[in-house]
């Protein structure tokens, strides 16, 4: 059995809002992340992702439930594993007038790390050629990469990234995506919280999807997106007649502009044979493999954006945006 880097059991977090309401941000969450690769952590805004990450890092105390990192119970054994964990959960904070290298060198020196770790970290995030440039002149994407470099100074086994591509342009998103993929391939376990689902599907080996603080689905990306297989795009000369024939045969049919989407199909040849028997010849028969976005939208369509939870309407006094949290904010750096 693969080693579990992250494991939560029955994890729950409650807050009191400024209006005195009880807010359940995370409810009975069982999360399992095995060692190696990139694991996506997905959910709508306000679903409990950031609250969960803060609990994993010891920045928020669970109301109930258990957390284990590398098999060690948290937060009791946090000192044992903290050097194996790196995280970027807020905007990076560096000295604007110092170069990228100098910022990292100061961090490394503060925690007693050798200078060679700065070289390695800059190389891992692809900033070697810009290391002497002033941090304040960096693009948003370069600033995010330097934040990741700061966490890599101590060579962590687990890297937690909370929405690392927020605010980036397409080129910046591509750069961060490529960097995350390379980190996962290097042996680092990456927990990636993101709402850009197409990007997640390109880099993640496995995902966990949550909604209203609850786990909705988890597993390998390929297996999860294959759970709704059995749909085909069909192009035929008479779409109306084809739709009528296929519907009467028990298939689910949706009319598109220039084709049909046919669901609940065991074999594609059943469609072509049925239509050919009625004199309709298929010009296109393409299996549709659903993407992660389709799965995400299906699972979260009933997410409680307006459903009360213990007197709380999500979107009001949201715990991830509320100032009712007493814990200190996380910063990027080598800790």
Image (tube, rainbow, N blue to C red):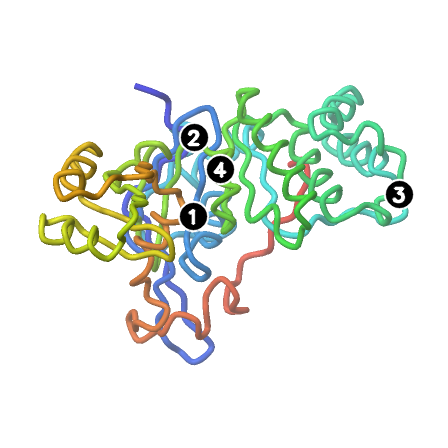
* Closer to the camera in the image, 322 or 180: 180
The disc, 1 or 4, on the residue closer to the chain's N-terminal end is: 1
Residue 99 shown left or right of residue 258 in the figure: right
Residue that label 2 marks: 205
Distance between the Cα atoms at labels 2 and 3? 35 Å
Residue that label 1 marks: 42
The disc, 4 or 2, on the residue closer to the chain's N-terminal end is: 4
The disc, 2 or 3, on the residue closer to the chain's N-terminal end is: 3
Vertical arrangement, residue 83 with respect to residue 64, above or below? above
Q: Residue at x 22, y 34 (%)?
A: 268
Distance between the Cα atoms at labels 3 and 1? 34 Å
Which percent across, then down, holds residue 310? 28, 71
Label 1 vs label 4, nearer the camera: 1
Mark 2 secondary-structure assignment: loop
Cβ–Cβ under 8 Å for marks 3 and 1: no
Distance between the Cα atoms at labels 1 and 4? 10 Å
Residue that label 4 marks: 191
Q: Quadrant of residue 232?
A: top left
Neighbor class of circle 4 (other Cα within 10 Å; few <14, some 14-19, many 20+) is many
Which percent across, then down, holds residue 239? 27, 53
Which percent across, then down, holds residue 205? 43, 30
Residue that label 3 marks: 134
Q: Quadrant of residue 306?
A: bottom left
The disc, 3 or 1, on the residue closer to the chain's N-terminal end is: 1
Cβ–Cβ under 8 Å for marks 4 and 2: no
The disc, 4 or 3, on the residue closer to the chain's N-terminal end is: 3
Q: Is residue 225 visible?
A: no
Q: Quadrant of residue 22?
A: bottom left
Cβ–Cβ under 8 Å for marks 4 and 3: no
Distance between the Cα atoms at labels 4 and 3? 29 Å
Neighbor class of circle 2 (other Cα within 10 Å; few <14, some 14-19, many 20+) is some
Mark 1 secondary-structure assignment: strand
């Amino acid at each position: 059995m693969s080693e579990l880097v992250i494991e939560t059991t029955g994890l729950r977090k409650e807050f009191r809002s400024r209006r005195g309401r009880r807010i359940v941000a995370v409810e009975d969450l069982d999360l399992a992340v095995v060692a190696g690769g990139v694991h996506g952590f997905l959910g709508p805004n306000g679903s409990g992702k950031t609250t969960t990450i803060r609990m994993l890092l010891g920045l928020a105390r669970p109301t109930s439930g258990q957390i284990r990192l590398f098999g060690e119970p948290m937060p009791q054994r946090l000192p044992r594993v903290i050097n194996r964990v790196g995280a970027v959960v807020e905007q990076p904070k560096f000295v604007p007038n110092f170069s990228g290298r100098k910022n990292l060198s100061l961090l490394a020196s503060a925690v007693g790390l050798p200078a060679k770790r700065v070289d390695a970290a800059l190389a891992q995030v692809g900033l070697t050629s810009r290391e002497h440039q002033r941090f304040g002149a960096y693009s948003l994407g370069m600033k995010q990469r330097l934040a990741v470099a700061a966490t890599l100074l101590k060579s962590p086994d687990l890297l937690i990234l909370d929405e690392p591509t927020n605010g980036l342009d397409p080129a910046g998103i591509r750069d961060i995506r490529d960097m995350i993929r390379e980190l996962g391939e290097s042996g680092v376990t990456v927990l990636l919280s993101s709402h850009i689902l197409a990007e997640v599907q390109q880099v993640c080996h496995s995902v966990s999807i949550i909604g209203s603080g609850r786990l909705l689905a988890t597993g390998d990306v390929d297996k999860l997106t294959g759970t709704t297989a059995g749909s085909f795009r069909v192009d035929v000369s008479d779409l109306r007649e084809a739709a009528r024939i296929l519907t009467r045969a028990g298939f689910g049919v949706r009319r598109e502009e220039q084709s049909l989407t046919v669901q609940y199909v065991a074999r594609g040849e059943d469609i072509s044979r049925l239509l050919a028997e009625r004199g309709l010849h298929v010009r296109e028969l393409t299996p549709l493999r659903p993407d992660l976005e389709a799965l995400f939208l299906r699972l979260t369509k009933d997410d409680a954006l307006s459903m009360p939870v213990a007197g709380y309407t999500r979107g009001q006094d949201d715990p991830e945006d509320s100032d009712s949290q007493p814990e200190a904010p996380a910063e990027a750096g080598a800790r």
